[in-house]
Image: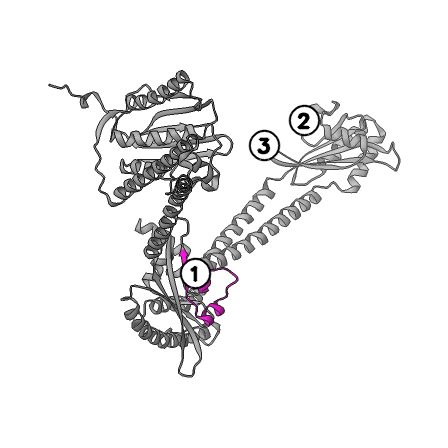
Amino acid sequence: MVKMKKIKSILNSLNTKIAVVFMLMILATIEIIGAYFTRQLEQSTIESFQTSIQIPTIITNSLATQLSKNTKKADEQLSQIVSNYNNSAISEIIVVDNKDVIRAVSNLNDKSRVGQRATNVGIKQVTSTGRQITWIDSNNNGSNMVQITPLTIGTGTNSTLGAIYVRANMQGVFDNLRNISYMFLTASFAASILSAILALFISRAITKPIEEMRMQALQVADGDYSGQVKIYSNDELGQLAEAFNTLSIRVERSQEQSESERRRLDSVLSHMTDGVIATDRHGNVIILNQMALSFLDIKEKDAVSKPITKILGLDDDVSAQELIGNQQEMMITVNEGTPDEMILHANFSLIRRVTGFVSGAVCVLHDVTEQQKNENEQRQFVSNVSHELRTPLTSLRAYIEALNDGAWKDPEIAPQFLEVTQEETERMIRMINDLLSLSRMDRGVVKMDLEWVNFNDFLSHVLNRFDMIVKNDEKDQTGQKKYSIKRKITNQDLWVEIDTDQMMQVIDNIMNNAIKYSPDGGVITVGLTQSQNQIILSISDQGLGIPKKDLNKIFDRFYRVDKARSREQGGTGLGLAIAKEIVEAHKGKIWADSQEGKGSTFYISLPFEPMSEEDDWDEV
């Protein structure tokens, strides 16, 4: 592994890259020139060889004259001319007439072919077109050049009397070309070695000062300013080294001053419990302490040199200069709408020099989240309780005043007024009882009587009570709202540890809400399923549904989607809040899903541990 890293480091170095590029440039140049030279040499050699085997015109004229006679003596003359022609490169000569009949051959062993018809396609092509053709024939016997020249007398379409076929061995030509190629390759290899040595020398001369500057830069980065880069020449690299040495000295001085100031600031800021942000005169952040980073949930690198308005999450309409100039106090909310929401009190003050010049500002952040939350909850609680109690008290006052004014004497009106006052009184009692229950839950003084129950049987028991209510209403014909319960409950035994009274209160609350807000004759669907280590209870109605904007607030205390309708139906606005507290006390979760006009579904999840046969026991 270490060896591989070392090789990789060498390959990635500038020294190696320059040497490789320089060597490749030289090799590419040599190869291009060599390829062009070899190609030209080969073409020139072949053309020269082709010219050397060309039959002289005086001989072709003599052969054409003898072919025109078409006598036995003429054939003897043809054989004699062919036999007497001496060219060491030519290995075979054949003379044919315009009927493709062989009339003479240079090879005495092929005398038997005289008088036979030539089968060579090239000969037939030349005798028919009157044009010379040449090609190189490569076979097992080596490479040969074949040249077929027409024999003519005079001009015209019938002037071709025959053709002369010449075959010449090119093995010597190709051997010479191969030897030249070997010589070129050897020279290229030698040139490559020399270019590599030269490239390494040149690249080393260039990269050595750069490498020294790199090492010195690393020392400066580590805080060591004692070293100096050696200047080898007065060229651009030498000037760069001199400028680097000057820069190193100035950086050392600036660093000493900055460190001195930073130590003083860090000593002060690190012991502060409030967040502190310092800016320059343009409002860009230059320093933050750890508490400010924690409050704003950011990193120092993401905050430094950024406008303070952006760091604090203020509107774009507010500029940093206006914020610093006015020195106004403000409340800033961080991570609004999330569980990590935090409210900060921001106080600004200017940083002035002795001359009065404003060089920046300091913003002090104080966490007032709990204070604001408590104040808001107290105000909201007082407002909600006052509002909820005011309505029944106002109603009670009106009816009591009416009774006091003589309505109690009316036998028809008096009972109605007394019934209303009783209902409003019971409503206030229910509200106060709910408030007391929530208060006990908030203080953690509620004790739960936990026991293992089969949740299937428990749920069926609760739903049977509601089924019985429907049957009694139908029997008594009281005119109450009709509904039906559809059950989708798993057959598997689901044993959970719950406080049955409290969990029954939760289910009763949700079921009563489903009945209240469902249309007459509506269907309430109750489902129970197992998902991994949880059981999930769902209760769906066919009511008006809950708007999306209100869905995450329905478990807040005194929150109602339709306040007028809820009061009309006797709701206190605390039932779902109590249900949430009870479910969470069982280490479960409760949530809702709804679509306006199509009803709502409430979900309750409780922890569940499957029980195996080994977990069962027999009672003694």
Residue range corresponding to the magenta coloring: 307-333
Callout 3: few (<14), some (14-19), or many (20+) C-alpha neighbours within 10 Å? few
Quadrant the C terminus occupies: top left
Q: Is residue 385 above or below residue 256?
A: above
Q: Is residue 201 magenta?
A: no
For residue 569, what is the image quadrant?
Answer: top left
Which is nearer the eye, 234 or 122? 234
**Quick check: 48 left or right of 132?**
left
Instruction: Tell which circle, 3 or 1, labels the residue nearer the N-terminal end.
Output: 3
Q: Residue 211 location in percent, x, y?
A: 39, 66
* Disc on res. 311: 1
Residue located beneath label 2 in the image: 110
Look at the numbered disc 3 and give the secondary structure of its residue.
loop
Tell me which amino acid carries mark 2. Answer: Asp
Look at the numbered disc 2 and give the secondary structure of its residue.
helix
Which is nearer the eye, 448 or 168? 448
Q: Residue at x 74, y 30 (%)?
A: 123
> Among all residues in the image, which is located at the extreme bottom?
355
Residue located beneath label 3 in the image: 141
Tell me which amino acid carries mark 3. Answer: Asn
Q: Residue 261 location in percent, x, y?
A: 33, 74
Q: Is residue 463 above or below residue 43?
A: above
For residue 132, what is the image quadrant?
Answer: top right
